[in-house]
Amino acid sequence: MTDHATSKIVLQVIHNRRSIREFLDKPVSNEVLTKILAAGFRAPFAAQLCSVIYTHSLEKMKEAGISAYPTAPVHMIFFIDFCRLEKIMAHRGYEYGYDDMMAIWLGIQDVVLMIENLTIAAESLGLGSVLYGLTPLKADSIAETFNVPKRVFPVVGMSIGYPDSAEETEIRPRFPLEMTAFKDEYLHHTDEDIKACMKKMDEGFLAQGYYIKSRTKVELVDKEDTIGFDKYSWSEHISRKFRSASRKGDPLIDVLRRHGFDLK
Ligand SMILES: Cc1cc2nc3c(=O)[nH]c(=O)nc-3n(C[C@H](O)[C@H](O)[C@H](O)COP(=O)(O)O)c2cc1C
C-alpha cells in the first residue's frame, strides 16, 4: 500500500468515528483486545501516569456505581496512576514530592492521549466505543470493586465492542474549524463568530434529532421550560449543563483528597 493510501485510511477512520451505544452480541477476542490496549500505550506520554482496568462483567461495573452500556462485551476504566511511579522512585531511593495539582494535570494528559490512541485502534479493527464522564465521582466504589490503591484515580469509563448496525449513529457536528484552530494568535470571537458556532452545532444536532430520539434534556428546576424537544439544541443543552444552577458544590476535590492526592 502506498503512503498516500495508508494516510487516507487513517484519516477515514478518524473522521468516521462516532460514539457507539449499542453493540452486537459478539465477544472481543483477547488478541484483538491486546492489540487495542497496546496501541493505547503507544501514545505520547509525560511519564506513563496511566493505567486501565478492563472487564467483561457488567455486574462489576454496576457494583462500582457505573452505568455502563449494557450490550457492550467489554468495559474499561482509565486511571491516573501515581502508585507505580512512586514505587519506581522508591527503588531509586527518592521520595515523591511533586506538586499534586501539576501531577494530576500530567496524569490526565497521559490518560486522554492513551484513550484516543486506543479508540482509533479499536475503530480500525471494526470496533466502536463510547466514553462516560461521571466516573471520577464514583472513585470510592470503583476502588472497592476493582481493588484500586490510593493515588490511582479514575478519569473516564468506556464501553467497547462491535457496533450494532441497527443503531442509528451519525457523525456528530463540530464547531467550524476556523473557530477552534487559529493561526499565529487567538481569535477573540465576535458575536457573529459565536452565532456561527451555535448555528453549525444546533442545526446539525436538530437535523439529526439527537435529543428528541434519545429523550435527553437537562431539566430546569428553577424556571419554566419553554423549549420543546423540537427546538432543544446542542447550545441549549450545554448551557443548561454548565449553568450555576446545575452546580453541586465541589465534590471532586474531596474525592481526590480521599484517594491520596494532596490538594490545598
Ligand atoms: C469525557 C467524556 C464523557 C462522556 N460521557 C458520556 C456519557 O456519560 N454518556 C454518553 O452517552 N456519552 C458520553 N460521552 C460521549 C459524548 O456524548 C460524545 O462523544 C459527543 O456527543 C460527540 O459525539 P461523537 O463521539 O459521536 O462524535 C462522553 C464523551 C467524553 C469525551
Image (spheres, rainbow, N blue to C red):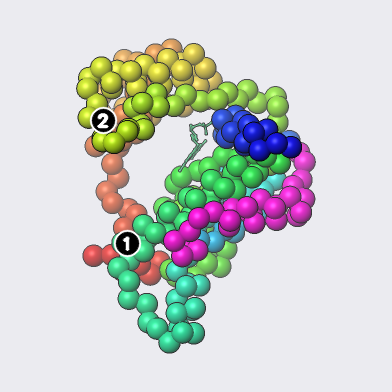
The answer to whether one can see residue 207 in this image is yes
Mark 2: amino acid = Leu
> What percent of the width, then of the height, locates residue 97?
32, 76
Q: Which mark is residue 102?
A: 1
Quadrant (top left/top right/bottom left/bottom right) for the N terminus: top right
Q: Residue at x 59, y 33 (%)?
A: 11
Q: Residues within 10 Å of mark 2 (few under 14, many from 20)?
A: few
> What percent of the width, then of the height, locates residue 229?
43, 16
Q: Residue at x 49, y 50 (%)?
A: 113
The answer to whether one can see residue 145 in this image is no
Q: CA distance from mark 2 to mark 1?
A: 27 Å
Which comes sooner in the sequence, label 2 or label 1? Answer: 1
For the image shown, how many numbered marks are present on the structure?
2
Q: Residues within 10 Å of mark 1 (few under 14, many from 20)?
A: few
Q: Is residue 28 magenta?
A: yes
> What percent of the width, then of the height, locates residue 146?
57, 63
Residue 259 sits above or below residue 13 on the image: below
Residue 243 sits above or below residue 87 on the image: above
Q: Residue at x 40, y 27 (%)?
A: 177
**Magenta extent:** 25-49
Q: Is residue 201 left or right of residue 91?
A: left
For label 1, the SS is helix
Q: Is residue 244 left or right of residue 5?
A: left
Residue 64 sits above or below residue 14 on the image: below
Kindly indicate the quadrant of the structure image that contains residue 170: top right
Quadrant (top left/top right/bottom left/bottom right) for the C terminus: bottom left
Residue that label 2 marks = 187
Q: Residue at x 50, y 72 (%)?
A: 84
Residue toward you, 23 or 177: 177
For label 2, the SS is loop
Q: Is residue 140 magenta?
A: no
Mark 1: amino acid = Met
